[in-house]
Structure formats: structure tokens, C-alpha cells
Amino acid sequence: MAQQMAQQKYIMALDQGTTSSRAIIYNAKAQKVVSVQQEFTQHFPQPGWVEHDATELYLCSLTVMQQALRQAKVKDEQISAIGITNQRETVVVWDKNSGEPVYNAIVWQCRRTADIAQSLIKNGKSQLIQEKTGLIPDAYFSATKIKWILDNVKDARRKAENGELLAGTIDTWLVWKLTNGKVHITDYTNASRTMLFNIHTLAWDNELLDMMNIPRSMLPEVKDSSCVYGMTDKDACGFSIPIASCIGDQQSALFGQGCFNKGEVKTTYGTGCFMLMNTGSTPIMSKNQLLTTIAISIDNQVQYALEGSVFMGGATIKWLRDQMGIIRTAHECDTLAESVPDSNGAVLVPAFTGLGTPYWDPYARGILVGLTRGVNKAHICRATLEAIAYQVNDMLLCMKEDAGISIKQVKVDGGASVSNVMMQFQADILNKPVFRPKNVETTALGAAFCAGLATGFWHSKEEILDIWKVDKIFMPAIAQSQRERQYAQWKRAVERSKGWIEQ
């Protein structure tokens, strides 16, 4: 048995999220052997600004990988490959000679560049940007963040124009660091989130680069989501293993859920909430403020997706815990919410960093309305979970109309999807069955699957579908009249939150 263990092969996934990095080692049945997670510092230098120290983020990621290898007691050669999945849109700009970031990573949640995005809209660039990238001009995406760094960090623009600076989303930064500066790449899914990548020609777009005044020399080479990019550098990180996947976290969850076919939908409940529908080999341009994005690229075959993005999902529960002190743990939010039949008229709109799909209002702010003296903390917990579910419903209604496809069910994953009370309300408000898998950590699993396919650890999508198992199905259980009444109340509350800080 000891000899068999010594010869056994594994896959490692690095799930680099918004608040933590996690390394998971899987066996051939996609069962978790070891999981190590570590949080890193969140920086909020001004209201609406969010940053990470890119070096701390890398060291945190490296630490969890090293610890996972030690805990699993496996050698480098037993890890078939590393698959990386990452928070998207967050961007790092660094000096390619010293390897030092010129500024903190600007996080996808950060709203400092809202004025840059608004100027693009006012100058009539929205249609051009959407036609080329599938995106809507917004501070959410990487392009405005790179531009801000070049415009505001001393000497950054001069160095960039001299070819001395590199830029990339977090996958690019991690691969560059792990290979000790040998590989500067990204994959199609991450590139499609920058607002600089043409999703039809599958190349960085010169017109968009000129519009944002970003030198092409800063940007990485773009490759498939599932292929070997290079080896980790033994001197830099202590192990030598092929890196065989990079994929944005939401696309990774779509793949990890086995949504390989047109019309299949998943929602991930992480820091934010993200709904993606696989639309196959053809991009569908949204008429309802959804995003068109690249779902995955394997063997030079690109699949597209429609996506809705909600900025405050699980982060809203964290706000209740850390800022408001109403709960001590996320589970306590569930317990309190289950202790009352409804929110007693309270409606929370968690627009703490603006509103995403389908409103795209960076000037919206969070509100809690409908309060009476009868509202207690249990009702506020219930309103918090309902707010997450309402935002998901906003996305599904848009997706259904844009795609013209009847959606039979929604697969769910992510940390907050373990909440039975929220998933039941989600099924009620969507009026669709909600399928939760046994493994809700499908973001990491998707990266593992991509890396495994690239190295022959797994041989086909069919093999992956055999691994996916359902844990619980939540069926809608309220009357249509109640559903319509509650959703109308949500829409009224959203209207009151919009444009709150606009001058």
C-alpha cells in the first residue's frame, strides 16, 4: 500500500480568490486529499477603493501550495500538474527587470475608475466596446485600472512606453512569479475580462489599446485555458511542477459544474455572485446589460457564455459579521434567518460598491428600507440572504430573454451555496429547480479538470461528467402571486439605491 501511495499521481488546484488563496490536491476521482487556505490583507485606502498587496498575494498563494504538498506527503513528480483559477479583472503592473509591482493590485471591486468608464460612455464608445469585447464600459474591468496606474503612479507611463513594465490579471502575475519571470501569459477567459481583448478575432485590440493609452508591450501572450504553460521554478518556489491551466474563477466554476453544453447555467456564490450560461461556439450580444464572455478554450476550440455579475454576494454576509457585528459566523446568519418566516418587510440592497448586472450603476449605494420597530436582527439576516437571491433572479430574467433558451434548472456552487434557507428562497424566487453538487468548491475543481485534461490525468469531458454528483435539489414552493409581490418590492428598493452619490 505504501508503495502504491508513493506511485499515485495527483492534481493540484490553486484557487486564488478575492479574500484568500487556497491549494487543493485531488486524486483521480476528484476527491479532495488536502486543502490549505489562507486569508490575506484587504486594503481600502479611500471609500470605494479596494487594493491587494500583489507580493503578499503571491506569497500567500505560494505558502498554501507548499503546505499542501507537505501535508499530503507527496513528491513534486507525483503532481501531474497545477491548475490556477483566479479572481478576474484585478490587475497588477510590475517592473519586468526588478519584478516589483509599481502599485498595489487594483481589485475588481474597486470603483476609483468609475469616472474613466463614464467618460467612455459619454464619448459614445459603449457600442464599440461591447461589439469588440462583449463588455459594458465599467470600472469593474482591467483596462480602466491599468490606465489609472499609468496616469497616477510616478514614472509609470514613461517606463511602460519604454517597454519596462508588464501588466496582467492575477493568473498572469502568479505564473510569472512561479516560473521566476520566464513565462508572461494569460488565457482566453481572463483576457476576455480586460476590456482590451477582441473576443471575435481572439487578439488584443489595437483600437481599444489606443483608446485607453495602454502600450501593447505590457500585455501577456494569450493561450488556451487548458495547456502546459511552463514549469514552476524550483529555486523560486521549492517545487518543479507543470502549470497546465489558467482560467478565470467563474468560467472555472462553469467547467467544474460540467456545463459543457449550450443552455446550461450555473451560479457561483462567492464574494460576489456570478451567473454564466454556456452559449456554445457563438457569442450572443446582450440587449439586457449582460456580458458576453469567453467560457473556455480547449484544443483551440472557444466556447462563449453570457454572464451576469453581482458585486456583493457572500461579502454581504461578511459585512453583517465584520462591520455590523450582527452575527459571529456565516452559519449564524442561516440560523437566525430560519427562525423567522420572512423579513418582516425589510429589504436590503447591498450596493456597497455600486450595482452590477443589469443596472451597472457605480453611483448606487447600499440601503436598508421597510424598517419598523418590529424588525429585529433575524429579519435583517433573512433580508440579507434574500437580497443575494433577488440579485441572482435579476440576472436569470435577462439571460433567458437574451439567449431565447428555456432554462430548465440552475446549478449552484461557492461557499454561500451551502445555505439551505437561501437556496430554498433562490428556487422560490427563480421558479426553477436549484441543483447543488456534493462538491460546492467547483471553482477549484474546474481548474483541476482543465490541468488534468492538458496532461492526460483525465482523458475526456465524459469522464469528468461521471465524477460530478448532485447533493440536493431545491424545488420552488411558493405561489406565483407571492413571488411577483416580493420581487416587485425588491425592484422598488433598487430604484431608491440608484444614483445615490451622483452629483
Image: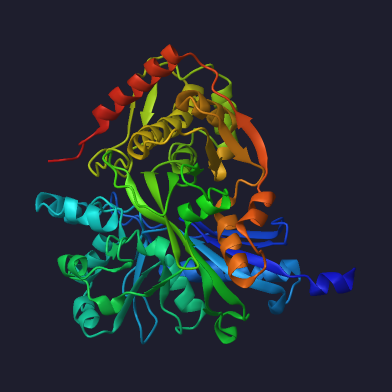
Percent of width and height locating residue 326: 49, 33
Percent of width and height locating residue 216: 25, 76
Q: Is residue 278 left or right of residue 192?
A: right
Vertical placement of residue 134 versus 269, above or below: below
Relative depth, front residue between 12 and 157: 12
Relative depth, front residue between 78 and 354: 78
Relative depth, front residue between 322 and 246: 246
Residue lying farthest right? 1
Quadrant into which the C terminus falls: top left
Vertical placement of residue 475 versus 140, above or below: above
Colour style of the rendered protein structure: rainbow
Percent of width and height locating residue 395: 38, 37
Vertical placement of residue 476 versus 130, above or below: above
Q: Is residue 248 visible?
A: yes
Percent of width and height locating residue 259: 53, 48
**In the rendered image, which quarter is residue 333 located in?**
top right
Residue at the image position 38 percent from the left and 79 percent from the top:
100
Residue at the image position 41 percent from the left and 54 percent from the top:
281
**In the rendered image, which quarter is residue 414 located in?**
top right
Residue at the image position 73 percent from the left and 77 percent from the top:
75
Q: Is residue 64 visible?
A: no
**In the rendered image, which quarter is residue 220 located in?**
bottom left
